[in-house]
Image (cartoon, rainbow, N blue to C red):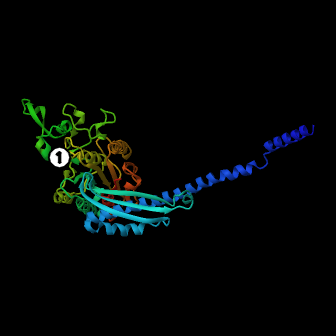
Amino acid sequence: MFSASITRHFKGAASRFVGANQGNIAVIFAIACVPMISFVGAAIDYSRANNARSSMQAALDSTALMLSKDLSSGAITASQITTKAQAYFAALYTNTDAQSISINATYTANSNMGSTIQVNGSGSVTTDFLKVAGFPNINFSTASTTAWGNVRMRVAMVLDNTGSMSQNGKMTALQTASKNLIDQLSALAKNPGDVYISIIPFAKDVNVGASNYNQNWIDWTAWDAANGTNVCNSRNSRGSCTGYTWTPANHNTWNGCVWDRDKDNENPGYDTLNTAPVTSNPYTLFPAEQWSACPVALMPLSYDWTALKSKIGTMAPNGNTNQAIGMAWGWQSLASTTPLNAPAKDPNYTYKDVIILLSDGLNTQDRWYTNAASIDARQKILCDNAKGAGVTVYTIQVNTSSPPDPTSSVLSYCASNPSDFYMLTSATQVISAFQSIGSSLSQLRVAR
């Protein structure tokens, strides 16, 4: 009996002990804290290491770019690259967590990417938490490569030659700025063909050169109707002429001017494209016009820097404004098709096609319209098509009128980026704007 009572009490105590839970939470929390603190600590250590690496990447990118500029301009020699790299990097890298920093730079001339400079960097971060787990440091490394010489540029300079360019010294400033830009871009060419430039003077029309009068891409329909003489082919008894035959003038008397291509017979129209002309399709041809204010003839892509600057020197202001036709022929000059036949592109290189369009006023006249809104609408489609084809477009409005003209919405729209549209209020600013564009085009890129 006594034995049975003791047994019952023992079983009851054991059951109560097994069911007791008042201290479990504290025990479980204490056990769980260890991995939780470890995870948080590891995240902090890895975040510090990642920040140190990201900062190093930015510093290496800038270092590599500056080294490339220095080397390509002749400011340093290849033997000075590592020393200069360390000096640039030391000034740029300010992360205080990084330890055991090491960098080196390697120059490779004429690789399949052009000339390259690769800057490699490495370092470590001393851990605060992971060292408990046996990881006293986190090592990291990164690299940056700049390349130049593998990108070839083709630049169409589309320049306003209208009558208002004679005011406030605008034409003189444009000629100076354009010649300076040629000098700036030609300096980037290490080999013939690295840089090509075309000159497209425009007013209401563009002059493609009177020597092209025998080319099959010219449409003579309107020109023949407007240029010629009436020849008497019958007379009455009193000698008075009773019948005339229209005899068109000889095409060799044409002054070289063409106006906008057709806009109605294709959607959106050949005036907004750089489609090559097809003799069997008259809508693709370029209509000849004998306009008295015809600007000087354009110059297709060339790296004859002297001839290009000479062409700019012959420009003279006259006539009305049709930015769209200048833009269209700027784009035509970049195409390896008739009528301007740009040189074929070498598949071993990357090419950057650029149009720089400068005008001092709003559109006033094209083949169909004498109001800016209608001309602008066609020009916007043209600009969309050119940019869609990969052409980078810079636009410049020289707004020296008093009172000033409104900001040209179409020039602003046509620029590839908002920063690629320049609003100028004096002729002297043309020179600095062209210099800025030249600097933008000459910027080296971080390749990888």
Q: Secondary structure at mark 1?
A: loop
- Residue 170 spot, x, y in % from top left: 29, 61
Residue 73 is situated, as x and y percent measured from the top left of the image, at 26, 65
Marker count (numbered): 1
Quadrant in which residue 171 is drawn: bottom left
Residue at horizontal 6 percent and vertical 29 percent from the top: 237
Residue 223 in sight from this viewpoint: yes
If the image is split into quadrants, where does the N terminus sit?
A: top right
Residue 26, given in percent of the width and then of the height, sits at 73, 52
Q: Nearer the viewer, residue 25 or 260?
A: 25
Left or right of residue 431: residue 294? left
Q: Nearer the viewer, residue 58 or 47?
A: 47
Q: Is residue 43 left or right of residue 410?
A: right
Q: Position of residue 192 (x, y in %)?
A: 18, 55
The amino acid at mark 1 is Gly
Judging depth in this view, the residue of 221 and 10 nearest the camera is 10
From where the camera sits, is residue 431 visible?
Answer: no
For mark 1, does the 10 Å Cα neighbourhood hold few (<14), some (14 to 19), or many (20 or more) residues?
many
83, above or below 386, in the image: below
Circle 1 sits on which residue? 256
